[in-house]
Amino acid sequence: MPPALFDWFVPCPRGLEVPLAAELAEIGQRHLGGASFKAGAQVPGGVHFKGGWTAGMAANLHSRIASRVLLKIAHGPYRSENDIYELAYQQQWEQWFTPNQTMRVDITAIKSPLRSLEFATLRVKDAVCDRLRELSGSRPSVDTQQPDVRVFAFLTINECTLYLDTSGDPLFKRGWRLDKGAAPLRENLAAGILRLTGWTPGTPLYDPMCGSGTFLAEAAQVALNIAPGVERRFGFEKLKQYDVNAWQKLKVAAVDAKRAARTSRADLQIFGSDISGDMLDKARANLDRAGLPDLSLKQVDARNMTPPTDAPGILVANPPYGERIEVRGRGPRGEIRDTGRGRRDRDEDDEAFTRAQPDPADTEFFISFGNALKQRFPGWRAYVLTSDRKLPGLMRLRESTKTPLFNGALECRLFRFDLIAGSVRNRPASQDAPREE
Ligand SMILES: C[S@@+](CC[C@H](N)C(=O)[O-])C[C@H]1O[C@@H](n2cnc3c(N)ncnc32)[C@H](O)[C@@H]1O
C-alpha cells in the first residue's frame, strides 16, 4: 500500500515564498529517495505541498527558509465561533496525541469577521479538550511556553483551516545560537536572503557588519552541506504517529554529512567583519557551536572596509537601523562610540521597531559606506537589507533591484547594487527624497 499523502503548509517570512518553493523542490529531489513530494501553491507567507511523513520530516530537517512545517488536519466554512468549535471537535486528535500531553492553540486571521480571535482560540482549545475528555476521561492542559503539541488555526473571511504543528520551536532556532548579540537576523531570513542573492559556494561572500554572524553561519552550512536542523529536536517527535524508521534514516544521513563537514578542508571564501570586538567574539562562539570551521573575522569600521579577495564576489549586510541598534564609529573617523542603547532580546512576535529619522551622523556613515562600495568593490554585487527605503539615496547609489521582505513585522527592502567599475550610477544628493513605490 502506498504511504498516506498529507497536505502540508510551510510558513516563511513574507517575501521568501519563491525561494522557499525552490528549496522545497530541491529537498524533494535530494533527500526523499523516491518518496512522494508534490509542490503546491505559493501564497503570501508560505508554500503548500503534498507528501508523506518523510517529506514533512525532511522539510523540517533541511529547509533553511521555512518558519515551521504544518500538517493540515481539516478545512471548512465558518460563520461563528461555534462552527469553528464543531470543525475542531470532529477531528481525530486522539490519533496524534494523548490527554497527558500539554498543548497550545494559535490563530492567524485575514479579514475574519469574528469580533474576538482570543475567543475563537479558546473555542478551538475547548473543542480539542472536550473531544479527548469524552473519549478518555481526561483532557490535555495548556502550556503556552513549552507545549508538547501546537495546533494552528488559520481563518479567512469565511473558511477555517486547522493544522498540527510538526516543528515545535520555530525552525529559525537551529539549536546552536547562544550569543544573540543585538538585533540578530533570524536564521531563516538570512538563509532566504542568501538564496535571493544567487550566492553559491565558492563565490566570495563578505558581510562587513556581520554582528553575531548569521549570514556567515548560514552560508557556511550551505557550503558544507550541513542540514540546518541536525542539532535540534522537532515537534513531530512528540506525536503518537510519525514514521520513526524514515526519521532515523534522514537523521543519520544528516549527522554523517555534518561529521564529514568537520574534516573538510574546503576554502569557504566566507568573510565577516564588524566594528565591535564583542560582536565578533559572539560570532566566533556561534560559529564554533554550530560546528563550523574558523572563518576570517576582522574588526573593521565598514567605512574603511576593503575586499577580502582579489576576485569579486557578493557583499551582504543588514546595517543597524533606527532604534534597534545604533551605527557605531559614526563620529569623526576613528572615533568609536558604543552607546549600548536600544539593545533588546529578540522576541518571536515583537519586531515592530520604528525607524527614527536618520540623524546627520547616520547620514555621514551611509555616505562613507556607499563611497567604500563604489571606490573599492568594482565587480561586486552588494545586497543591503534595511527598513529605510531612503538608504540608496543616503548611500548615493542607485539600486538595481529592491525586494520587499519582512523581518518579523518590520517591512524591509533588500536593495541590490551592481558595483560595475566605472558604471555605478551615482545619485546626486537632491534625489534623497523618498520615492513612491
Ligand atoms: C543589525 S546588526 C547586524 C546583525 C547581524 N546580521 C546578525 O545577524 O547578528 C548591525 C551590526 O553593525 C555593526 N556596526 C555598527 N556600526 C558599524 C560600523 N561603523 N562598521 C562596521 N560595523 C558596524 C554593529 O556592531 C552590529 O553588529
Image (spheres, rainbow, N blue to C red):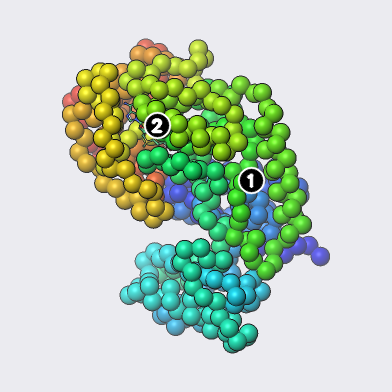
Residue 198 in the figure: left or right of residue 260: left
Quarter of the picture holding the C terminus: top left
Picture coordinates of residue 290, whole percent (x, y): 57, 38
Q: Secondary structure at mark 1?
A: loop
Query: Which image quadrant is residue 398 in?
Result: top left
Q: Which mark is residue 14?
A: none
Query: Which image quadrant is residue 49 in?
Result: bottom right
Which mark sits nearer the N-terminus, 2 or 1? 1
Residue at 45% across / 41% down in the picture? 179
Picture coordinates of residue 112, whole percent (x, y): 38, 70
Task: Identify the amino acid type marked 2.
Answer: Asp
Towards the viewer: 270 or 40: 270
> Is the CB–ligand 1 distance for label 2 below 8 Å?
no
**Residue furthest out toward the right:** 1
Residue 435 in the figure: left or right of residue 109: left
Task: Identify the amino acid type marked 1.
Answer: Val
Towards the viewer: 56 or 167: 167
Q: CA distance from mark 2 to mark 1?
A: 28 Å
Residue at 73% across / 44% down in the picture? 253
Residue at image mark 2: 278
Q: Is residue 382 visible?
A: no
Q: Is residue 377 above or below residue 164?
A: above
Residue at 32% across / 75% down in the picture? 115
Residue at 60% across / 36% down in the picture? 291
Q: Is residue 137 above or below residue 337?
A: below
Residue 237 in the figure: left or right of residue 83: right
Quarter of the picture holding the N terminus: bottom right
The 10 Å Cα crowd at callout 2, few under 14, some 14 to 19, many 20 or more, is some
Q: Quadrant of ligand 1?
A: top left
Query: Which image quadrant is residue 299 in?
Result: top left
Residue at image mark 1: 230
